[in-house]
Image: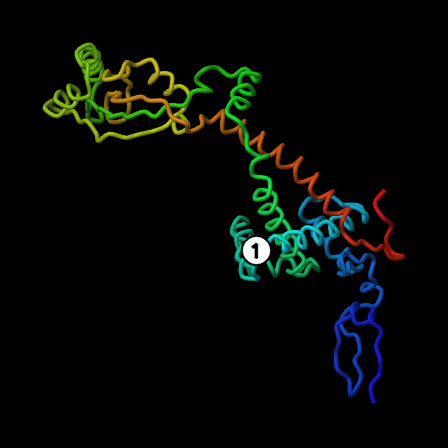
Amino acid sequence: MTTALSPRFLILAPFCVAGWMLVTCGWPAQAQTVCVMVNGEPVTEYDIDQRSKLDFISTHKQASRQDVLNELIDEKVKIKEAKKFGVDPTDSDIDQSYGEMGSRMHITADQLTKSLESQGIRPDTLKTRLRSELVWGSLVRGRFKERLQVGEKDVVTAVKAEGGDVQQMDAFEYTMRPVVLIVPRGSPSAATEVRQKEAEALRSRVQTCDEANSYFKTMQNAVIRDAVVKTSADIPANLRKVLDDTPIGHLTPPEVTKDGIQMVALCGRKATTIDTPKKQEIRNKMFAQKYEAQSKSYLLEVRKAAMIEYRDCAAPRG
C-alpha cells in the first residue's frame, strides 16, 4: 500500500523513514513554506531566514524581508542564465572560493563553517551566494567584454579632470644601477661630508652608465649594483620626479643612507603602456562603473524573462 504525497509537500521538506511512511524531519513546516517559485525552483521562508542572518553578519545592518527575497530571486535567475552559456562551476570550485574567503579572514574553511553554524547559518547559504557572485561576474565580463573596455583617451581625460599632471598620465620604464659610496657606521659627520663632495664631483664627470661602471668598480669603498628595471607604478612620486629630471647616463643627486652616500645611475628611460598608479586607479573606477551599469541592465532583462510566481507569503517587487 502506498500513500500519495502532494508535489508541494515533496518540494517543501526533507524526509525521514518511519515504517512505510515518509515524514518531515528537522525543519518546522512554517519555515518550509514556499514564498516564490523561480523558474521552477522554490525560495522558502527558511531560505529567507538564513539569508537574512548571513546578510546581517556581513553588513551589520538588518535588510528588509523584501530586499532579501529579491536577492534570492536574483541569485536563482543569475545561476540559471549562467548555465545557459556554460558557466557552471563545480562544487570543488565553490569549496575553493569558500576556503579563500576563510583565508582572507585568517581562518580555515572548517573554522568558517563553525563560525556560521554558531550563528544559526548553514554553510550552503554562503556557498550559494558565492556561486551566484562567481558565475555572474564571469558571465557579464565574458558576454560584454567589448562594452566594458575603458579607452585610453577616456582615462587621460578623467585624470586631467581630477587635476592630474603629466607625470600622472605618462608611464615610463626606468633602468637603473644603484651606487653607494660607503661610509662605515659610527664615522664622524666629517667623513659623510667628504663622501658627499666626492659624489657631487662624480655627478659632473659621469656621462654614461659604462663610465659609472668603470668609476665605481675601481673606487675604494664604493659599490655599483646590478641593473634593476622599474615602472612608474613601482616608484614613489618623489623619486619619479628625480628620475625624470635626470639625463640618461647621469647620476641622481646624492642621498645619505645608513650605508653611506647613495645615488642612482639612470641607464634608460622609455615610455611604456603600463599604467601609472593614478591611471590604474581611474581605470579601475571607470571599469567598475561600466560593469555595475551593465550588470544591472542585464539582470533586469533576465528577470523579465524569468518565470517568477509569488505565493501568499511574498509580495512582488513594486
- Image position of 67 with respect to 173: above or below: below
Position of 267 with respect to 21 (left or right) is left
Crowd band around label 1 with a 10 angstrom C-alpha radius: few (<14), some (14–19), many (20+) = many
- Percent x, y of residue 146: 56, 36
Residue type (three-letter) at the residue carrying disc 1? Tyr
- Residue located 34% across and 29% down the image: 230
- Percent x, y of residue 194: 18, 14
- Image position of 82 with respect to 144: above or below: below
Residue 262 visible in the current orientation: no
Callout 1: helix, strand or loop? helix
Position of 286 with respect to 248 (left or right) is right
Mark 1, residue position: 98
Tell how many labels: 1
- Residue located 77% across and 84% down the image: 18
Q: Nearer the viewer, residue 184 or 17?
A: 17
Instruction: Classify residue 48 by image quadrant.
Output: bottom right
- Residue located 60% across and 47% down the image: 139
- Image position of 278 with respect to 160: above or below: below
Q: Nearer the viewer, residue 310 or 193?
A: 310
Position of 304 with respect to 147 (left or right) is right
Residue 303 visible in the current orientation: yes
Instruction: Classify residue 144 by image quadrant.
Output: top right
Extreme-right residue of the structure: 312
- Percent x, y of residue 31: 81, 63
- Percent x, y of residue 128: 65, 56
Task: Classify the position of the N terminus by image quarter.
Answer: bottom right
- Image position of 106 with respect to 171: above or below: below
Task: Classify the position of the C terminus by image quarter.
Answer: top right
Instruction: Classify residue 253 by image quadrant.
Output: top left
